[in-house]
Amino acid sequence: MVECSRLWVELRARVSRRSPLVLIAFHKPWGVLSQFRSDGSPNRPLSEFGLPPRVYSLGRLDADSEGLLLLSDEPGLNTRLLDPERGHPRTYWVQVERIPNETAIQQLAAGVLIQGNRTRPCRAWILDPQPTLPPRDPPIRFRKSVPDCWIALELNEGKNRQVRRMTASVGHPTLRLLRVRIGALELGELAAGAWRELSATERRLVFSSTPRS
């Protein structure tokens, strides 16, 4: 009986020493993988950014995409955030070639056919005013005779390279892609390559709906 009591005390002490679960916002730069191991390419893994141990990325951003990436050590968050049936929104700013007309915007919003599957209806609009962002390193493709434009897409699904394939399907290839919001949590002024642990209030924003704008 004494031995059982001692083991119970030790177990409780181990549990109490465990770090609390965390939810982290990271501004993923261009050329960075959404994983901690290198894939043999020149792209950098997450292990280079001093993130806490045991966290994993919730969803992913392609190496050539930038912006808000969430990481956590909490089980079950992937399903809660990424299941399309839950309708959890993510907002992207997309710099595209040429200026889309209203028809192209309506096509994106209604859903387009990519790889034999139609995307879910989403919100799509031209950003007004157009954002001014720090230059990307390396810079985007530039053609003096071809204008570019920033649009926004709010999706509740995330198939492989979906945003790029959507804009290409309506004749506007993506030049630069930045995720700026998950739920109602915005990337804000978080610098590229920087991360921070979210407060309880910010955590609630992650799981709420995006404000209309």
Image: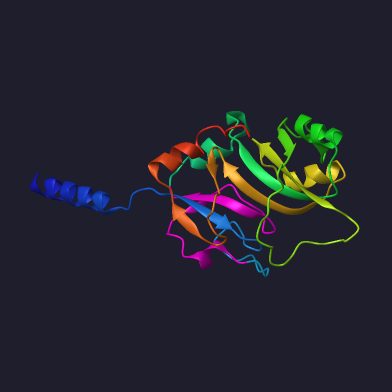
Name the foreground residue: 86 vs 191: 191
Q: Position of residue 157 (x, y in %)?
A: 66, 37
Which corner quadrant holds the C terminus?
top right
Q: Residue at x 12, y 49 (%)?
A: 3
Name the foreground residue: 144 vs 79: 144
Q: Position of residue 140 (x, y in %)?
A: 76, 61
Location of residue 114 (image quadrant):
top right
105 w.r.t. 193: above or below = above
Q: How is the image coloured?
A: rainbow
Which corner quadrant holds the N terminus?
top left
Q: Residue at x 59, y 56 (%)?
A: 34
156 w.r.t. 36: above or below = above
Q: Which residues are magenta?
A: 44-73
Q: Is residue 87 magenta?
A: no
Q: Is residue 49 magenta?
A: yes
Lateral position of residue 54 relative to residue 101, left or right: left
